[in-house]
Amino acid sequence: MILFERNDQPRPQLAEVTGVREGLLCTMGQDSTEGMPLFAPAGVAWLPAEGEQVLLLPFEGAYLCAGALCKPQGLAPGELTLKSAGGASIRLKNNGEVVINTLRITLDGQLINGKESD
């Protein structure tokens, strides 16, 4: 099966976030969109910041936001970071450590305050 085989059908696109109103996203890309829903894994809520690049997918005659362009700086394969626009972060490392901002929690529960080590 070939997806998006007809040229007149909406296609996935990257767009820039121009604003968020009442939890709904506004973007500017190939098409200008307003009031589109955001999707995320269950239990995760997020709002992209203005200027971020997001992936839009066609959905029921409109678009939905499937996620933001990822910048995995400093991550090893298999690691995960949650980071806010203000700089707060939680990182799950492959060695079992959890790093909350600069506080490291080792696999055995030891707390190490200071700069994160990679």
Image (tube, grey):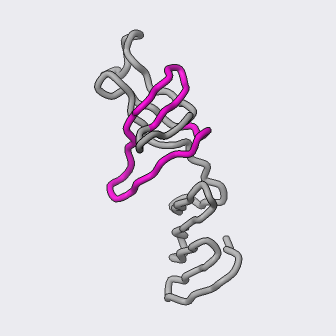
Query: Where is residue 43 shown, x and y percent of the image?
Result: 34, 59
Q: Where are the magenta residues, as a range?
A: 25-53
Q: Is residue 107 above or below residue 37?
A: below
Q: Main secondary structure of the magenta part?
A: loop
**Residue at horizontal 59%, vertical 65%?**
88
Query: Where is residue 79 shown, x and y percent of the image?
Result: 53, 63
- Using residue 62 as the reference point, say whether residue 79 is left or right of it: right
Relative depth, front residue between 28 and 101: 28
Relative depth, front residue between 21 and 72: 21
Query: Where is residue 72 shown, x and y percent of the image?
Result: 60, 53
Q: Does the stretch in magenta take in 45?
A: yes
Relative depth, front residue between 100 and 79: 100
Query: Where is residue 58 shown, x and y percent of the image?
Result: 37, 26
Q: Does the stretch in magenta take in 99?
A: no
**Residue at horizontal 55%, vertical 82%?**
105
Q: Quadrant of residue 59?
A: top left
Relative depth, front residue between 9 and 6: 9
Q: Is residue 47 above or below residue 100?
A: above
Q: Is residue 63 above or below residue 106?
A: above
Which corner quadrant holds the N terminus?
top left
Which corner quadrant holds the C terminus?
bottom right
- Using residue 76 as the reference point, say whether residue 58 is left or right of it: left
